[in-house]
Amino acid sequence: MNSAENVFLTVNSIAFFCWIFLFVFYEKTWIYKALFSFVMVGLALTYAFFITQALTGESQGGFDTLGNLKLLFEDDLAVLAGWIHYLVFDLFVGMWICRDSTRQNIGRWWILPCLIFTFMMGPVGLLLYFIIRASKSGKYLQDPFSAG
């Protein structure tokens, strides 16, 4: 097993446990501080390291066309960096969903499917939360930072 594979397994395990902790402790403010200050920063630094390795290494391609993106993601380090990118942003969205659901008085069991879908398919989970939030508030047009 190579080092990129070990990093992949490690960041996946970290993300998985963070999602569990987020669901269990979402009403506690310390969870957001811990995830934001330690996990998100650590994963972001890991991402920065691997995307730098991919972009300055021997990999071909880039971000300017779909074809170049496909070339870039033929490199294991670029794929790993892309995966970490997803993990960080999806976890951030999950944190927002949890904080917002507390402000909106949306119960734990309503957000569980949103968190699962956000973990597995990012935007689908966020969309599901938007639908639940709109149905609970009775408002289609919403402010993502409002308290009600």
Image (tube, rainbow, N blue to C red):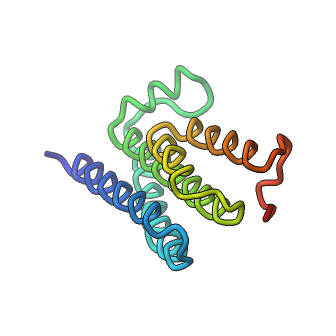
Identify the residue shown where x is 56% and y is 60%: 95
Residue 101 position within the rendered picture, expressed as x and y whole percent measured from the top left: 64, 59
Q: Give the image quarter of residue 18.
A: bottom left
90 relative to 20 in the view: left or right: right
Identify the residue shown where x is 50% and y is 44%: 113
Identify the residue shown where x is 37% and y is 44%: 80
Picture mark count: 0
Direction top: furthest residue: 67
Residue 100 position within the rendered picture, expressed as x and y whole percent measured from the top left: 67, 60
110 relative to 71 in the view: left or right: right
Identify the residue shown where x is 63% and y is 45%: 129
Residue closest to the eye, 99 or 135: 135
- Which quarter of the rendered picture does the C terminus lie within? bottom right
Residue 110 position within the rendered picture, expressed as x and y whole percent measured from the top left: 56, 49
Residue closest to the eye, 102 or 46: 102
Residue closest to the eye, 141 or 135: 135
- Which quarter of the rendered picture does the N terminus lie within? top left
Q: Give the image quarter of residue 83.
A: top left
13 relative to 69 in the view: left or right: left
Direction bottom: furthest residue: 30
Residue 105 position within the rendered picture, expressed as x and y whole percent measured from the top left: 68, 62
In the depicted structure, whether residue 33 falls above or below residue 40 = below
44 relative to 141 in the view: left or right: left
